[in-house]
């Protein structure tokens, strides 16, 4: 009788070995469609974009090589640097407020409150609405509040700034909340009980148990809010369109207006896009490295 389990284990190991060899043999075949799609949709356009940033063109087939002239023309005026500074301020505020709000809601909704599932659904729903629609909705709401005072959202840059922050929070807090809830629910009950037995209060529990345990969730949410903040376009276009006087224009909208709104500046718009990509990639990768190092420590 003891020979039967032994034979079963041998058969199982043999089957696993066959499967591993099959995967290794056909890996390239299965990966090829994905690699082709990645190359067509991302890699090739990115390379073409970098190349075109050194050309003066109106279409991709009539370019004239001009070296780094497009990059010099970026700084003819301060439109790009103003948009960059506005985007940085907006992103910093949004990352902090969204993550604090999402984490607070996640803590509240993992305490067994009645109707928790309904609340999760309600808080998540704004993320399903498109950016342009959200921008129009919040423009109506904010103007409805400001008009009795004789102003609108584009009367002063501060209204546009905080309007964008409120919109971004309303759209993204629910999505980030779901990620934080998953992280909190994954914390070992034994770890929590051990901390309670040791006499840890709520602050100590939060700082020494909960936050280190959900660092993977913090990494993901920080990355998403950071990149979404820098890449924001639809909401900026619909809510303020950069007004007043381009003072609420973010980087993505600035690039769009340069490329499509100024004849002969297509190459400059492309050069801005290259710089924009480098900035976002550098900041996002730096953030990932910093937060992942905390995961290792945790």
Image (spheres, rainbow, N blue to C red):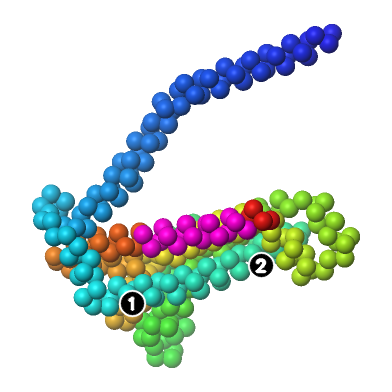
Within 10 Å of the Cα at label 2, are there few (<14), some (14-19), or many (20+) other Cα atoms?
some
Residue 293 falls within the magenta-colored stretch:
yes
Label 2 belongs to which residue?
A: 104
Magenta stretch, residue numbers: 278-294
Relative image position of residue 178 (x, y in whole percent) = 61, 56
Residue at the (77%, 64%) spot, across then down: 205
Q: Give me the disc on residue 213.
A: none
| Name of the residue lying farthest toward the bottom | 149
Judging depth in this view, the residue of 31 and 104 nearest the camera is 31
Determine the residue positioned at 71% across, 50% down: 186
In the image, is residue 222 above or below residue 239?
Answer: above
| Quarter occupied by residue 54 | bottom left
Of the 4 image quadrants, the one containing the N terminus is: top right
Would you say residue 37 sits in the magenta stretch? no
Residue at the image position 24 percent from the left and 73 percent from the top: 75
Q: Is residue 167 visible?
A: no
Q: Nearer the viewer, residue 22 or 242?
A: 22
Q: Position of residue 244 (x, y in %)?
A: 32, 82
Callout 2 secondary element: helix
Helix, strand or loop under label 1: helix
Q: Residue at x 58, y 59 (%)?
A: 291
Label 1 and label 2: CA atoms lie apart by 33 Å
Vertical order, 8 against 103 (above or below): above
Q: Which residue is mark 1?
A: 82
Q: Is residue 44 visible?
A: yes
Percent x, y of residue 267: 19, 61
Of residue 26 and residue 246, the one placed in the foreground of this image is: 26
The 10 Å Cα crowd at callout 1, few under 14, some 14 to 19, many 20 or more, is: some
In the figure, residue 147 lies in which quadrant?
bottom left
* Closer to the eye: label 1 or 2: 1
């Amino acid at each position: 009788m003891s020979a039967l389990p032994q034979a079963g284990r041998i058969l199982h190991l043999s089957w696993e070995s066959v499967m591993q060899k099959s995967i290794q043999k056909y890996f390239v075949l299965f990966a090829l469609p994905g690699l082709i799609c990645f190359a067509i949709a991302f890699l090739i356009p990115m390379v073409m974009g970098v190349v075109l940033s050194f050309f003066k063109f109106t279409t991709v087939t009539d370019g004239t090589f001009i070296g780094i002239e497009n990059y010099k023309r970026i700084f003819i005026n301060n439109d790009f640097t103003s948009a960059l500074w506005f985007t940085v301020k907006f992103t910093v505020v949004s990352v902090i407020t969204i993550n604090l709000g999402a984490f607070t809601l996640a803590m509240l909704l993992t305490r067994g409150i009645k109707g928790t599932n309904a609340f999760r659904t309600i808080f998540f729903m704004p993320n399903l609405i498109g950016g342009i629609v959200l921008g129009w909705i919040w423009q109506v709401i904010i103007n409805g509040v400001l008009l009795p005072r004789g102003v609108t959202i584009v009367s002063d840059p501060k209204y546009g700034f905080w309007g964008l922050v409120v919109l971004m929070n309303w759209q993204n807090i629910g999505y980030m909340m779901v990620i934080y809830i998953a992280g909190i629910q994954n914390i070992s009950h034994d770890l929590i009980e051990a901390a309670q037995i040791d006499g840890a209060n709520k602050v100590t529990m939060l700082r020494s148990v909960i936050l280190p345990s959900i660092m993977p969730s913090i990494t993901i949410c920080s990355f998403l809010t950071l990149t979404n903040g820098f890449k924001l376009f639809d909401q900026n276009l619909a809510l303020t369109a950069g007004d007043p006087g381009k003072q609420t224009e973010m980087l993505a909208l600035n690039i769009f207006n340069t490329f499509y709104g100024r004849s002969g500046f297509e190459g400059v718009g492309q050069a801005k896009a290259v710089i924009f990509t480098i900035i976002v990639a550098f900041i996002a990768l730096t953030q990932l490295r910093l937060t992942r190092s905390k995961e290792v420590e945790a």
